[in-house]
Amino acid sequence: MTKTKKITNRDVVLLTARNLFLTQGYLATSMDEIVITSKVSKTNIYYYFKSKEELLAAILDQLIGAYTRQMQEIAARSDLPVQERFDLFLQSMAGPETSFLAGCPFLTLYTQMPQEADELRRKVGLFFQEQMRLVEDLLLEGVRKGEFSPTLSTKAVAGLIVSTLEGALFLQHANQDPALLVQTLTTLAHLLK
């Protein structure tokens, strides 16, 4: 028998705030709007989160955890050739959601963070460093297995891939052109062959 986790008010607030922050912006979302949309009392929200910034930190931690777990699971799939894992990795980094203000949830939240939110900015930076490390590790494995060129500068290419993907997510959103991301993913995959 599978035990289902009861959805708490905290969960409802996190989901509601995440959706509002990512679709209309952190700065444009008030705590009152979160109260109205979530149907959770302001007192209850402030019991879990002392400030809007603390709520943002919890959302960021959830997103980082989910994306990182997904990337690590793909990287660990040794039953697949590196190229296939790399393709899955790129698709996963691109994510299924395209309605975020800046295309990417991390870029959306980062650009809206308060200037004094140094710890949150650092978390986003560390997340992208980890993504580049995972991409570099995949590239190194591909070079070792002969799937990628032995002259591939894996560290530089990993940075190029992550930054290109982030740029494509933004441009796809800004231009309302979903084909842009597909073309970028296809091009990145072909460049490595």
Image: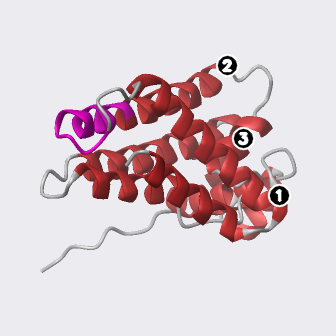
In percent of width and height, residue 107 lies at: 68, 42
Instruction: State which tag comes first along the sequence, 3 or 2.
Output: 3
In the rendering, which numbered label is found on residue 132? none
Q: Start and end of the magenta stretch? A: 136-148
Asked whether residue 79 is drawn in magenta, I would say no
Q: Single out the residue that lies furthest toward the right.
A: 28
Asked whether residue 146 is drawn in magenta, I would say yes
Assess whether mark 3 and mark 1 are in contact (beta carbons under 8 angstroms): no
User: Residue 136 vs residue 147: left or right?
Assistant: right
State which mark lies toward you, 3 or 2.
2
**Gap in angstroms between the C-alphas marked 3 and 2:** 15 Å
Amino acid type at mark 3: Lys
Amino acid type at mark 1: Ala
User: Residue 83 vs residue 185: left or right?
Assistant: left
User: Residue 85 vs residue 158: left or right?
Assistant: left
Q: Secondary structure at mark 2?
A: helix
Q: Label 3: which residue? A: 52
Q: Single out the residue that lies furthest toward the bottom.
A: 1
Q: Label 2: which residue? A: 118
Predominant SS of the magenta segment: helix
Q: Label 1: which residue? A: 174
Picture layout, residue 16 above or below residue 115: below
Picture layout, residue 7 above or below residue 77: below
Instruction: State which tag comes first along the sequence, 1 or 2.
Output: 2
Q: Secondary structure at mark 3?
A: helix
Amino acid type at mark 2: Asp
User: Closest to the observer: 142 or 98?
Assistant: 142
Residue positioned 62% across, 54% down in the render: 44
